[in-house]
Image (spheres, grey):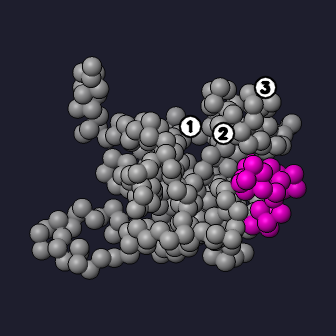
Amino acid sequence: MTIKKAVIAAGGWSTRFLPTVKTYAKVLVPILDKPQIQYLCDELVNNDINQICIVHRHGEKSLRQHFKPDAILDAYLTKNNKNQYMDSLNNLFKKASFTLIPQSNSLPYGNGTPILSAKNFIGNDPFIYMYGDDLLIEKVPGSFLKKAINTFISQQASGVTAAQPVPMDQINRLSSVKIKAGTTNQIDTVIEKPKPKDAPSNLCIFGRFIFSNKIVSVLKKTAVTKGELWLTDAVNNLAQTDKVLVEPTTKDSYWKTTGDPLNFLKANLAIAWLNPDIKKDLKTYINNLH
C-alpha cells in the first residue's frame, strides 16, 4: 500500500487572529520565514505525498493565489537575482500538485467537515488529514509522519492519529483517549473536551491523521453535537468497529498548536530554536527582556 493523497483543513475564520486575517488565510501567516501551511506541505512531500488538497473557507482567495506560480513575480526575482526567496514554495510546486476546494456552506460547521468537502478528491484511497493550525516541531520535517504511515500500513489499521500528553487542567479544551485493554496503542474510546474528572487519560489527539476512506462514510453518519461535526466523534465511532491506533509524539517531534496568539508566538520560538544561526541571538535577546 502507498499513500499519495493529503487533505489540509484551512476553512475556519480564525477569529482569534482578527483583524489580521480578515483578507487572507491564517495558515499563510509566517512561522519564522515561511507560511505555516508550507511546513505541513514539507512534511507531506518528504514522505512522497504528491497530491495535496487544501479545503479553504468559502470565498477565500489568498490560498489560491499563493499556490499557483506568478510569472510577474518570477520575472522580477530573476532580474534582481533574488530567486532564492521563493525556493521553499517552488520546491513544493516541483514535488506536488495542489487542489483547492471551498468548504461547502451546506455542510455543518466542524473540524470533520473538510473531509466531507474533499470526498471526491479522496475517492477510495487512504489519505493524510491535517489541521492547518497544528504544527510539528522537528528538525527533519516529516519524521513523525513517516512513523505514523509505517504504523498505518504495517498494522493494517483503518486509522492512525497523532497523540500527545497534556496537562490535565487543559483536557477540557482538547480530547482524551482511552487505550484498549491488552494493547499499547489501540483506541478504545476518545472523548472531545471532557471535564477532567471524566477524562480517561491526559493523552489527547491532534491534527495529524491517517485514514482509510471509511472515515468518509463514518463522518456522514456522525451526529452534530454542540453545533459542530467533530472529527473526534467520528474517530471514536470508527474505533468501535475498526482498528484505530495512536502514534505518540516524542521529544524530537512534538506538537504545538498555533490556534491563538500566545501559542502562535511559542510555536515561532520553537521553530527558531531549531536554527543554530538564530538561537544564540534569540536566547540573548530573551534573557535581556525586562
- Mark 1 Cα within 10 Å, few/some/many (few <14, many 20+)? few
Q: Write the residue at 67% across / 77% down.
A: 120
Label 3 sits on a secondary structure element that is: helix
Sequence order check, earlier mark of 1 and 3:
3
**Magenta span:** 216-245
Residue drawn at x 23%, y 75% as measured from the top left: 74
User: x and y percent of residue 103 in the render?
Assistant: 60, 68
One can see residue 174 in this view = yes
Q: Amino acid at mark 1?
A: Thr
What type is the residue that disc 3 sits on?
A: Lys
Provide the residue designation for mark 3: 197
Circle 2 residue: 174
Q: Secondary structure at mark 1?
A: loop
In the image, is residue 21 above or below residue 116?
A: above
Give the side of residue 194 with respect to residue 24, left or right. Answer: right
Image-based side of 107 in relation to 85, left or right:
right
In this figure, which residue is indicated by the disc labeled 1? 250
Q: What is the tally of numbered marks visible in this picture?
A: 3
Image-based side of 158 in relation to 24, left or right: right
Depth check, front residue: 88 or 36: 36
Residue 152, label in figure: none
